[in-house]
Amino acid sequence: MYISSLTLVLSMCSNLVKGSIYQNGQLRITNYPNTKVNRSTYDFQTYDADAAELSYKGRWDSNKVSFWSAAGLVFGFTGDTVAITFGGATIDTTLIGYRISGMDWNFTNVTSGATHMLVTPETLGVDQPDPFNPQRFELRVSNWGYGVQIDKVHVAAGQSLIKIPNFNRTIEFIGDSLSSGMYTSYESMSGFAYGVGAGLGDTEYYITAYPGICVTDQDCWGNPRGQVHQWFYTTDTSWRGTKLWGNNPEPWDFSKQETTPDLVVINLGTNDNNSANNVTTSDFINAYTKLIQGVHGKYPKAQVVVMQLWIGFYQNGNSFSQNLGYEQELQDIVAYFNSPEYLSAPQIWDGTTNTTTTLDSPSESFVHYFSTKGILQHNDIGPQWHPTDVGAIKVAAHLIQYIRLKFGWDMVATGPE
Ligand SMILES: *[C@@H]1O[C@H](CO)[C@@H](O)[C@H](O)[C@H]1NC(C)=O
Ligand SMILES: *[C@@H]1O[C@H](CO)[C@@H](O)[C@H](O)[C@H]1NC(C)=O
Ligand SMILES: *[C@@H]1O[C@H](CO)[C@@H](O)[C@H](O)[C@H]1NC(C)=O
Ligand SMILES: *[C@@H]1O[C@H](CO)[C@@H](O)[C@H](O)[C@H]1NC(C)=O
Ligand SMILES: *[C@@H]1O[C@H](CO)[C@@H](O)[C@H](O)[C@H]1NC(C)=O
Ligand SMILES: *[C@@H]1O[C@H](CO)[C@@H](O)[C@H](O)[C@H]1NC(C)=O
Ligand SMILES: *[C@@H]1O[C@H](CO)[C@@H](O)[C@H](O)[C@H]1NC(C)=O
C-alpha cells in the first residue's frame, strides 16, 4: 500500500513537471487540435448561417454572433464531414467545444474568417450512426468574453443538413461569473450552470450570464448595465456588444427563441453585495424584484428559482465559516412573490417602460428558493474567489437533485460526457 501510493505521488510529480492535468484519471488535453483548413481545396455542400436546419441555442444576434455564456449551435447532418466558416466578427483564438451526438467534447481555437474542419471520417462514432436519428452536431462557445460568428456550415458534396427537433424542456440561467464558470477549466463549459443544463440530459439550456454584472442597473466592475436591463437584450455587457451595436443593442426577441424556458434559475447579487460597487440594499431589492416581474412577463408559465448566495469563506477560529450576502433580502423577495398580495394581482414588466402591468388573472405560485447551505466548503472556492471545477460540480449535482425532486424532471442522461 505504502509503495503504491508513493509511486502515485512520484508519477503525479512528474506529470506536474510536464504540466499535465488529470481529469477523472484521464489526461486532459490542452494542446487543442488545429482544425483550420483551406476551404477552396474541398468540394463542399454549403449552407448559409440562417439555414432553417440550424438551431441556435442561447443568444446570437441577427448577424449570428454569439453572446453571453456557452452559446450553442446544433444541427443534424448526413455523411461524415462537417466544417464551419467563422465570420469576421469572431474573436481570434476563441475556444469552442464541439461533438457529435453522445461522443466526448473536443475543443479547438477558431480563427476569424477561417474554415475549420470539425467532423471527418476519423471522428469517433461518425461511422456508427443511430439508425433512427441523424448524427447530431453540437458546438458551444467556452468563453463568455469571446464570441464567434457563424458564416457558413459545410457538409460533404451530395450530403445535407437535417433539422434536429428541440428537447421538450428548457432551463435558463440568469447570472454573473458564477454561472459563467469563470476560472473553471473549460470556463462556461465547466461552470455549474452548464453542469445542470447538460447534466440533466435532453434539456435545452441557455446561460444568460456575464462576469461582474449586478442585477441592479448600474456600473459594476466595468459592466455598464445590470441584468435588470441587459437580460432584455441580445448582447451582453462586453466591449464586443458595444463595438458591434454601439448605443443601439438589439432587444432580445423572446418570441424567436428556439424554445421557451420552463425553469429560470437566478444567481445574482454577489456583485451587488460587494462594497466596491456601491449598490444600496433597496436598489438591489427593487432590481431583483423587477427582473422576476420581467421573467414572469416574458415566460408566464416558467418556474423561477432564486439561489442563495455563497459569497465566500473566512477562517473562524479553528474552522471556516461562510459569508452570505443579502440573505434575508432574497428570502423576502421570494416571500413577496408567494404572497396573496402578489399572486392575486401579479405584476409583470416588459423591460422598457418604467411601470409594471397588472395581469388580469391571478398567478399560481412560481418563485422558489434554493438553499446552497452545506454544498460548498471553504476549499471548494479557488484562489480567485470562484468555485473550483469540483465546487461547480457539487453545486450542479445538488441543484439537479433539487430540480428533480421539486419539479419532477427526470435525469435522463445515462452515458454521454
Ligand atoms: C488554398 O487552396 C487554393 C487552391 O488549391 C490555392 O490556390 C490557395 O493558394 C490556397 N490558399 C492558401 C492560403 O494556402
Ligand atoms: C485556445 O484557447 C484557450 C482558452 O481561451 C487559450 O488559453 C489558448 O491560449 C488558446 N490557444 C491558442 C493557440 O490560441
Ligand atoms: C479531437 O480531435 C483530434 C484531432 O482532430 C482527435 O485526434 C481526437 O481523437 C479528438 N478527440 C475526441 C474526444 O473526439
Ligand atoms: C419529453 O420527451 C421525453 C423523452 O425525451 C418523453 O418521455 C416525454 O413524454 C416528453 N414530454 C412531453 C410533454 O412531450
Ligand atoms: C463608491 O463610492 C465611493 C465613495 O463615495 C467612491 O470613491 C467610489 O468611486 C464609488 N465607486 C463606484 C464604482 O462608483
Ligand atoms: C451584503 O448583504 C448583507 C446582508 O445579507 C448586508 O448586511 C450587507 O450590508 C451587504 N453588503 C453590501 C456591500 O451590500
Ligand atoms: C424612467 O425613469 C428614469 C429615471 O427614473 C428616467 O430617466 C427615464 O426617462 C424614464 N423612462 C421612461 C421611458 O419613462
Image (tube, grey):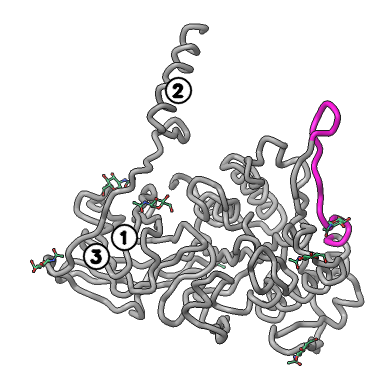
Q: What secondary structure is found at the residue carrying circle 3?
A: loop
**Mark number, residue 75:** none
What amino acid type should be assigned to the residue bearing mark 2?
Met
Q: What secondary structure is found at the residue carrying circle 1?
A: strand
Q: Position of residue 267 (x, y in %)?
A: 70, 60
* Sooner in the amino-acid sequence: mark 3 or mark 2: 2
Q: What is the spatial separation of the Cα atoms under label 2 and label 1, in whole angstroms?
A: 38 Å
Asked if the residue at tag 2 contacts the one at tag 3, i.e. Cβ–Cβ closer than 8 Å, the answer is no
Residue located at (71% from left, 81% from top): 297
Which quadrant of the frame does ligand 6 lie within?
bottom right
Nearest the eye: 304 or 292: 292
Asked if the residue at tag 3 contacts the one at tag 1, i.e. Cβ–Cβ closer than 8 Å, the answer is yes
Query: In the image, is residue 321 part of the stretch drawn in magenta?
Result: yes
Q: What secondary structure is found at the residue carrying circle 2?
A: helix
Q: Position of residue 89 (x, y in %)?
A: 39, 73
Q: Position of residue 33 (x, y in %)?
A: 29, 49
**Mark number, residue 12:** 2
Mark 1 — residue? 135
Question: Which span is picked out in magenta?
Answer: 315-330
Mark 3 — residue? 78
Above or below, 226 against 190 in this view is below
Dot 1 crowding, Cα within 10 Å, few <14, some 14–19, many 20+? many
Say which of marks 2 and 1 sits in front. Answer: 2
What amino acid type should be assigned to the residue bearing mark 3?
Thr
Nearest the eye: 2 or 305: 2
* Sooner in the amino-acid sequence: mark 2 or mark 1: 2
Image position of 376 (left or right of 195): right
Above or below, 371 against 157 in this view is above
